[in-house]
Image: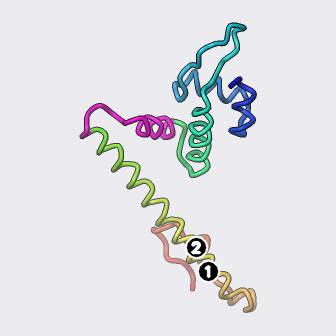
Amino acid sequence: MRTHEVADQARVNPRTLRYYERRGLLPAPPRSPAGYRDYPHTVIAVVRFIKRTQRLGFTLADAEQLVQMAAGGPDNSVDARTLADTYLAAIDRKIADLQCMRAALDDVLATCERSRAERSRRLIYALDSTTNPPA
């Protein structure tokens, strides 16, 4: 597949593909006789995975490690386990934060019909464990 075809199907800019190649997220594809990049179809799933991890709040460096894990991870099983544990802990923290936000938004919804002064004001404090929210 040529660059523009992959970019269209993965919903990214063609420059993104070249950038991912330079970063090592994607292997350099073989070239056609005319000199065009000739990507395998599997690269679309990898690019979509990278973009999705970014939308979930992971960095491009995180995405790179996750792509490497998907390819089998580090050679050493201890390193592979450590890396997986690290990402699981990060995901658990994100889930906990999202649950706090959800609970605060549920409180907002539950108090919407009240006067403004009586509505829940916990939302701004939902992710801050250092302060106590107002009633």
Q: Which residue is mark 1?
A: 106
- Asked if residue 53 is positioned above or below residue 133 in the image, the reply reads above
Please give the range of residues in magenta. 61-78
Name the residue tied to disc 2: 102
Q: Is residue 42 above or below residue 29?
A: below
Residue at figure coordinates x 43%, y 53% from the top left: 90
Q: Nearer the viewer, residue 107 or 80?
A: 80
Amino acid under disc 2: Arg
Q: Is residue 129 above or below residue 84?
A: below
Residues at badges 1 and 2 in contact (C-beta under 8 Å)? yes
Across and down, in percent, residue 114 comes to: 73, 92
Q: Is 121 in the magenta?
A: no
Q: The residue under label 1 is which amino acid type?
A: Asp
| Residue at figure coordinates x 67%, y 88% from the top left | 111
Q: Residues within 10 Å of mark 2 (few under 14, many from 20)?
A: some
Q: Give the main secondary structure of the magenta stretch.
A: helix
Q: Residues within 10 Å of mark 1 (few under 14, many from 20)?
A: some
